[in-house]
Amino acid sequence: MNNKTKNIHNQNKNKLFVASIATVVALALFASPLVAIDDAFATKKKNKAQQSISQSQSSAQNALCASGGTTFLSCNNVNFQHQFNSGNNALAQTGQGENSAEQSISQSQSSSQNSQVVSGGDTIGSGNNINIQSQTNTGNNAAAQS
C-alpha cells in the first residue's frame, strides 16, 4: 500500500470515528427527555407537608377595690408566663406516590384572674391573684416517607 492510499484510508477512519461520535451524541440528546419521563412530566409525584410550631399565651385580669379604710397592696393581679421550645420539625418525602404529612408542636397558656376586696379597715396582702406558668418543649418531630 502506498502513502497516498494510506492517507485516504486514515482519512476515512477519522471520518467514520467522528461520524460515530456525532451519532452517539445525537442519540443521547434525543433520547434523554424520553428516558426521564417522571422528571419531565411529573404526573406521579404528589407531596403535601404542613409543619407548625406555635406558642400562645393569654391573660385576662380584673381587680376591684372598695374601701372605707386602708388598702395596702390589695386588689393586684400578677401573672408570669414563660414558654421555651427548642424542638424541631424535620420532614423528607419522595414522590413515589401520594405523600401527606402534618406535624405540629403546640403550646398554649391561659390565665383568667379576678380580685374583689371590700373593706372597712386594713387589707394588707389580701385580694391578690398570682399565677406563674411555665412550659418547656425539647421534643422533635421527624417524618420520612417514600
Image (tube, grey):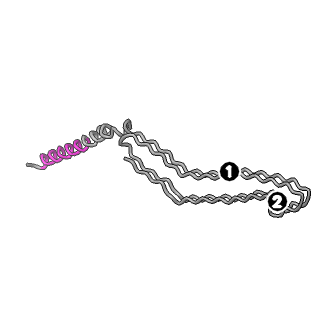
In this figure, which residue is indicated by the disc labeled 2? 74
Residue 4 lies in magenta, yes or no? yes
Q: Is residue 55 left or right of residue 89?
A: right
Kindly identify the amino acid type of the residue bearing the numbered disc 2. Ser
Which of the two labelled residues, at mark 2 and mark 1, occupies the earlier sequence position?
1
Q: Provide the secondary structure element on which disc 1 rests.
A: strand
Q: Mark 1 and mark 2 in contact (Cβ < 8 Å)?
A: no
Badge 2 crowding class, 10 Å Cα cut-off, few under 14, some 14 to 19, many 20 or more, is many
Task: Give the main secondary structure of the magenta stretch.
Answer: helix
Q: Which residue sits at x=71%, y=51%? A: 112
Q: Which residues are magenta?
A: 3-22
Badge 1 crowding class, 10 Å Cα cut-off, few under 14, some 14 to 19, many 20 or more, is few
Q: Hey, which residue is sitting farthest bottom in the picture?
A: 124
Residue 140 x, y percent position in the rendering: 49, 57
Q: Provide the secondary structure element on which disc 2 rests.
A: loop
Which mark, residue 115?
Answer: none
In this figure, which residue is indicated by the disc labeled 1? 58
- Which residue is at the front of the view, 33 or 134? 134
Q: Hey, which residue is sitting farthest right in the picture?
A: 68
Residue 56 x, y percent position in the rendering: 63, 51
Q: Is residue 67 left or right of residue 103?
A: right
Q: Which residue sits at x=75%, y=52%? A: 114
Residue 71 lies in magenta, yes or no? no
- Which residue is at the front of the view, 19 or 52? 52
Residue 61 x, y percent position in the rendering: 75, 52
C-alpha distance separating marks 2 and 1? 23 Å
Q: Is residue 17 above or below residue 130?
A: above
Residue 46 x, y percent position in the rendering: 41, 39
Camera-near label (2 vs 1) is: 2
Kindly identify the amino acid type of the residue bearing the numbered disc 1. Ser
